[in-house]
């Protein structure tokens, strides 16, 4: 079974056309994600992982790297 | 307005030898610029140089033929553009006996009186070449902001120049190949950085430069630059005083640009700048102004309501062309053919449709509002720079980055959280004094296109860094200027001349044989603006305050009070999916992309399929990448893989003569 981390990395590679990024690289600072990219990412979390993301949770510490996303999903009960 | 071309040849050859060797080349170069001058096409084979010109007759329709030669000295000129103050210059040249009423002859006389420094007296937009047989020197010059184009190549067979690179390829001076570092420039800076062009071995003479070719040696120097230093600012100038200064200089800039022996019309976007130009022109013309606009079938790009309001208020005769999504795709091959560069936006396309509309109404000259955003701090980039500077003084502040939500109210909500804004806009915040502080965000955003490069291409260009190349070129004193002044300098040096005035300006106008004139880019306007304090231009976060104040009462309030609307055109919906043009299916295929070798075929395939089925609005990064790939493919296809031929009809139309006919004899 693929892990959440693998699924996230695959999504980011496929959606934002990057091959080379570390799990703790900031998406925003490294320009992996732009203004609409965040929406694509949140939509992916909501459909693929079936979690709800509240406005108050739209924070870099939840969303801005693979590492942060894995942590965020864990909090939401996704392994 | 016209097309020019030419090349050096050895001196001392007989007329027949010259004709045998060079006629075909002269004909091919001149004919390839037919669209720039459909009214006459001539070339002359002189002792030492060949000069060609295609003419769009605007001033002295009967007498202004080119190439034009001074009988006494043999000095001969080919000229593209306008010297708007030619009447004033003429009175300062009493020693020359004028035979025509053309501005070309004034240029010739001014050169004879002052040498190449005559350009310093010119108010205008020009690219020209002067052959001086007295010292066997070819002089070239380009206007201060790069409105008119000029390309050249130094080859083993001689020095060759032309208004467009295609003329150099038509006469086989060199084989057309993409300049790979130039492609990297284009996907960061929006254009290759002058003197680099999009083609290997072809250079562009940078704006505000003159060049000399003598004995096979080319040297160029800058003759003008904008001084945005603090020392040049009149600090005590109030907004009302600045408004009166602008009124005087801009009114005169418009007045001079209405000089022509054919009707002058105007573009009207529905924004402040073009509306103001239309208002000033309509006053001068006493009600005879015709205006031309682009409307978009897609409401999110469309500004027709504002255009109509302005046209009604000013009483102009108004014309509109409506652009559908599929027109953008259908026009792109022509856009790239004329533009000769890699693009990241489809926005030039509608300008080509617009110039066709103008030409269809038997009009050859239009005024536009281009340049006001650069000169009077209109762009969001300047506000962003201001906010980032403010924030950099207190980097820990949670409050300061919130200003970005006022700047970009259209950003998605997910971007509005202060922490997110901080990550996104905080790039380079630790070095607010960096020369490129203002442009780091834009260049890195555009630079995301580079992730689509093929592995080989990325490896070959790994040593080229566009931002470093810009920094290496900028004069040292600019580094000491305030952040907004540095931002303006970079904007003028990269985006304005490299993209807005070329791929989206001159080339889209001349593609339909129409001349554009730009009152806001009169150097007297630029110099007046440089002396105004930033606060009368960007007042708080209110852009172009002085222009708005001048506009109050001249243009409808609705235009002054609307939120600035960035000009955009459809991208993904026009190039892929149901409305995709035929060429895109072929040229965006994996095999064709791999044949060109710039982009990664597999990634492009994925991008195209992602965008074709996208249910939501595509991201800016994806749109830019798609346009970059499409334009690169079209450039490679039309110039390298299957080069377009110069038409027989245009080749036959060129008159090739052995001597330039003296001024006024025709």
Image (cartoon, grey):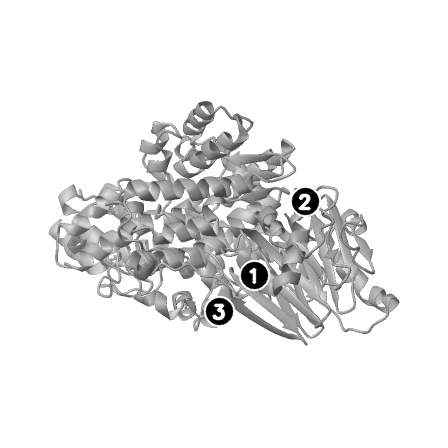
Query: On what subunit does the disc labeled 2 rest?
Result: B
Spatial CA distance of label 3 from label 2 is: 44 Å
Residue B56: numbered disc: 2
**Residue contact at pointers 3 and 1, CB within 8 angstroms:** no
The residue where tag 1 is placed is: B596
Q: Position of residue B92 (x, y in %)?
A: 60, 53
- For the residue pair B507 and B215, the one nearer the viewer reads as B215
Q: Chain of mark 1?
A: B
Per the model, the C-alpha gap separating discs 3 and 1 is: 12 Å
Which one is nearer the viewer's eye here, B329 or B131?
B131
**Cβ–Cβ below 8 Å for labels 3 and 2?**
no
Q: Quadrant of residue B464?
A: bottom left
Residue name at image x 26 percent, y 40 percent: B409
- Is the residue B205 above or below the residue B523 in the image? below
Pointers 3 and 2 within a single chain: yes
Q: Are dots 2 and 1 in contact, CB under 8 Å?
A: no
* Label placed on residue B456: 3
């Amino acid at each position: 079974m693929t892990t959440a981390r693998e699924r996230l990395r695959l999504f980011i590679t496929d959606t934002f056309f990057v091959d080379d990024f570390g799990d703790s690289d900031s998406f925003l600072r490294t320009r992996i994600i732009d203004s609409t990219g965040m929406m694509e990412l949140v939509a992916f979390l909501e459909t693929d992982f079936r979690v709800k993301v509240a406005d108050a949770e739209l924070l870099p510490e939840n969303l801005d790297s693979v590492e942060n996303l894995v942590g965020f999903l864990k909090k939401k009960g996704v392994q | 307005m016209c097309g020019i071309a030419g090349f050096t040849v050895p001196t001392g050859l007989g007329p027949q030898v010259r004709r045998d060797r060079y006629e075909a080349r002269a004909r091919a170069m001149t004919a390839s610029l037919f669209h720039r001058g459909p009214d006459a096409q001539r070339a002359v084979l002189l002792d030492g140089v060949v000069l060609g010109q295609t003419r769009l007759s605007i001033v002295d329709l009967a007498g202004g033929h080119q190439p034009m030669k001074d009988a006494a000295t043999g000095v001969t000129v080919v000229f593209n553009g306008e010297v708007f103050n030619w009447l004033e210059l003429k009175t300062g040249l009493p020693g020359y006996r004028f035979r025509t009423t053309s501005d070309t002859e004034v240029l010739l006389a001014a050169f004879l009186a002052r040498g190449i420094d005559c350009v310093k007296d010119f108010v205008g937009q020009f690219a020209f070449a002067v052959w001086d047989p007295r010292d066997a020197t070819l002089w070239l010059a380009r206007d201060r902001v790069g409105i008119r184009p000029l390309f050249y190549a130094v080859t083993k067979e001689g020095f060759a120049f032309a208004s467009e690179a295609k003329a150099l390829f038509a006469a086989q001076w060199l084989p057309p190949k993409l300049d790979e570092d130039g492609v990297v420039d284009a996907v960061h800076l929006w254009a290759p950085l002058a003197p680099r062009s999009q083609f290997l071995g072809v250079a562009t003479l940078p704006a505000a430069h003159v060049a000399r070719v003598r004995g096979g040696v080319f040297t160029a120097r800058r003759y003008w630059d904008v001084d945005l230093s603090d020392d040049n600012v009149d600090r005590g100038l109030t907004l009302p005083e600045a408004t009166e200064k602008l009124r005087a200089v801009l009114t005169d800039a418009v007045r001079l640009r209405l000089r022509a022996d054919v009707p002058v019309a105007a573009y009207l976007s529905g924004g402040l700048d073009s509306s103001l130009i239309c208002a000033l022109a309509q006053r001068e013309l006493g009600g005879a102004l015709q205006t031309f606009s682009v409307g978009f079938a897609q409401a999110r790009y469309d500004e027709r309501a504002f255009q109509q309001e302005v046209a009604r208020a000013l009483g102009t005769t108004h014309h509109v062309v409506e652009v559908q999504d599929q027109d953008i795709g259908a026009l792109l091959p022509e856009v790239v053919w004329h533009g000769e560069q890699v693009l990241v936006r489809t926005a030039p396309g509608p300008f080509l449709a617009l110039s066709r509309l103008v030409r269809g109404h038997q009009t050859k000259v239009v005024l536009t509002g281009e340049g006001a955003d650069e000169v009077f701090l209109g762009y969001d980039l300047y506000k962003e720079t201001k906010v980032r500077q403010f924030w950099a003084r207190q980097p820990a502040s949670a409050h300061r980055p919130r200003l970005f939500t006022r700047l970009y109210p259209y950003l998605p909500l997910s971007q509005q959280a202060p922490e997110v804004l901080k990550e996104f806009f905080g790039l380079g915040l630790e070095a607010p004094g960096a020369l490129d502080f203002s442009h780091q965000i834009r260049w890195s955003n555009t630079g995301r296109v580079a992730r689509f490069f093929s592995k080989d291409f990325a490896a070959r260009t790994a040593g080229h860094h566009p931002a470093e190349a810009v920094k290496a070129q900028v004069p040292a004193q600019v580094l000491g200027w305030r952040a907004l002044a540095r931002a303006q300098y970079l904007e003028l040096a990269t985006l304005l001349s490299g993209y807005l005035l070329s791929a989206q300006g001159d080339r889209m106008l001349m593609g339909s044989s129409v001349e554009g004139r730009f009152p806001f880019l009169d150097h007297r306007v630029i110099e007046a603006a440089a002396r105004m304090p930033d606060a009368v231009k960007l007042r708080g976060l209110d852009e172009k305050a002085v222009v708005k104040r001048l506009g109050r009462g001249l243009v409808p309030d609705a235009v002054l009070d609307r939120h600035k609307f960035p000009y955009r055109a459809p991208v993904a919906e026009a190039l892929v999916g149901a409305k995709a043009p035929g060429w895109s299916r072929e040229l965006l295929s994996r095999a064709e992309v791999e044949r060109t070798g710039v982009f990664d075929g597999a990634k492009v395939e994925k991008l195209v399929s992602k965008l074709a089925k996208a249910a939501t609005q595509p991201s800016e990064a994806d749109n830019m990448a798609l346009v970059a790939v499409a334009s690169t493919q079209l450039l490679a296809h039309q110039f390298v893989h299957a080069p377009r031929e110069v038409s027989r009809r245009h080749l036959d139309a060129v008159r090739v003569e052995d001597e330039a006919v003296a001024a006024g004899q025709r």
